[in-house]
Image: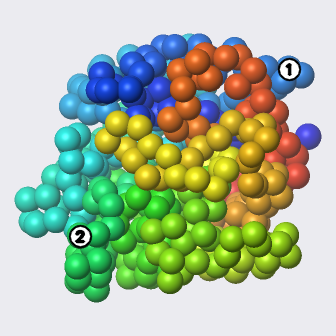
Amino acid sequence: MNQLPKLHNAMWPGLVGKGDGPDQEPPISLQRMLELTAAANVNGQKFDGIDYFLFFPHTDPNASDSEIRKIADQIASYGFSVGSLVAPVWPGTVGDSAMGDDQCQKKFLSAVEMACRIARVFEDHGIRKYGVIRVDSAEFGVEKWRSNAKANTARIVDTFKKAAKIAKDHGQRLAAEGEICWAGMHSWRDMLDVLEGVAMPEAFGFQADLAHTYLYLLGYNAPEHAMLADHYTQEQFDQAYKSMTDQLRPWTIDFHVAQNDGHVHGAGSHDKTGKHCRADDPNGKLNIVECSGYWLKDAQARGIQHICWDGCMFPNKTLEDPHTWNTILATMIAVREAHGWNTSPSI
């Protein structure tokens, strides 16, 4: 059996889209998310670790080092490692739009600095030995970006370059999440423009999510960059998927296993993004194991040591169902068996 990449579960499905607004469900605590993850078991195999969102209610990003160490102890008590961290870069958290004015940019960079500090505490504790810090443009929707696409992309690139310099100085790497709702990152072509504009592969790369990148192919927020039309054939899908991954894979330093049914979804303030589906959803459009292989080709050379499941905006009833997690874990084990390895990468 392959031992790598390590298999992680994300904690943010307990937070993203949750809240006290209309039609929202309450957040699920870190403790409960850890319990649900730890309970998953497929023929004696379990999750190896978690990926972690650095904001309330799971974390106060301004928490002291000693408070962060207590969280590390809590996570370690379940036998888990910590992998990738999500920096709180959005308006209403610590940060603000990467496309915004100098004050917005300053707030964005402060969120990255904060994430790097917490990453160091986790590393000093010993619970974190791999993973990236995830960011995005924190500019929701693409209409404002379209008003001056060239200048707005240049501003995002400038912010990301400065953020990457901060991360590099702290011994960290940033990964930009490819998701259709974030301006300047809403299509495979625009995402590639940003990555090539930053041009710091040692410190700034791409986070591929199966659910989100499937929407790239359909051109939901960028019809001019669609690679698939309606009622496509399997051959057309294979050709399009290979074309997209061949261009984005060299930049990919973090990877999310997921499923998508070809629709957008949202909850609360997080709307119109790739819909995450259960791993065994009969309407899922992706052969998860096969599609994962496109992204994980040569993964060791890019320093990938773990993969993570992402199931944002699942109903709480689904998250509380043990079958959900056992099915997810079984799927991730299948991905590792098909595309994994046994030698740690040298990075």
Q: Real-space Cα distance between discs 1 and 2?
A: 50 Å
Vertical relation: 77 (above or below) 142? above
**Coloured how?**
rainbow
- Using a 10 Å C-alpha cutoff, classify the residue at mark 2 as few (fewer than 14 neighbours), some (14 to 19) or many (20 or more): few
Quadrant of the snapshot with the N terminus:
top right
Q: Is residue 57 above or below residue 186?
A: above
Q: Give amino acid for label 2.
A: Lys
Give the numbered dot on residue 44: 1
Residue 259, how many percent across, how many down? Answer: 68, 47
Apparent side of residue 212 relative to residue 95 in the rendered image (left or right): right
- The picture places residue 201, in percent across and down from the top left corner, at 48, 73
Residue 19 sits in which quadrant? top left
The residue that label 2 is drawn on is: 144
Task: Determine whether the residue tagged by mark 2 lies in a helix, strand or loop.
Answer: helix
Q: Tell me where residue 334 appears, x and y as whole percent.
A: 85, 43
Q: Is residue 239 visible?
A: yes
- Disc number placed over residue 203 in the picture, else none: none
Identity of the residue drawn at 63% across and 62% down: 214
Label 1 Cα crowd, 10 Å radius (few <14 / some 14-19 / many 20+): few
Q: Amino acid at mark 1?
A: Gly
Q: Does label 1 or label 2 sit earlier along the sequence?
A: 1
- Give the quarter of the figure containing the C terminus: bottom right
Q: Nearer the viewer, mark 1 or mark 2?
A: 2
Which is nearer the eye, 194 or 323? 323
Give the residue displayed 47% in from the left and 53% down from the top.
Answer: 273
Q: Is residue 127 left or right of residue 41?
A: left
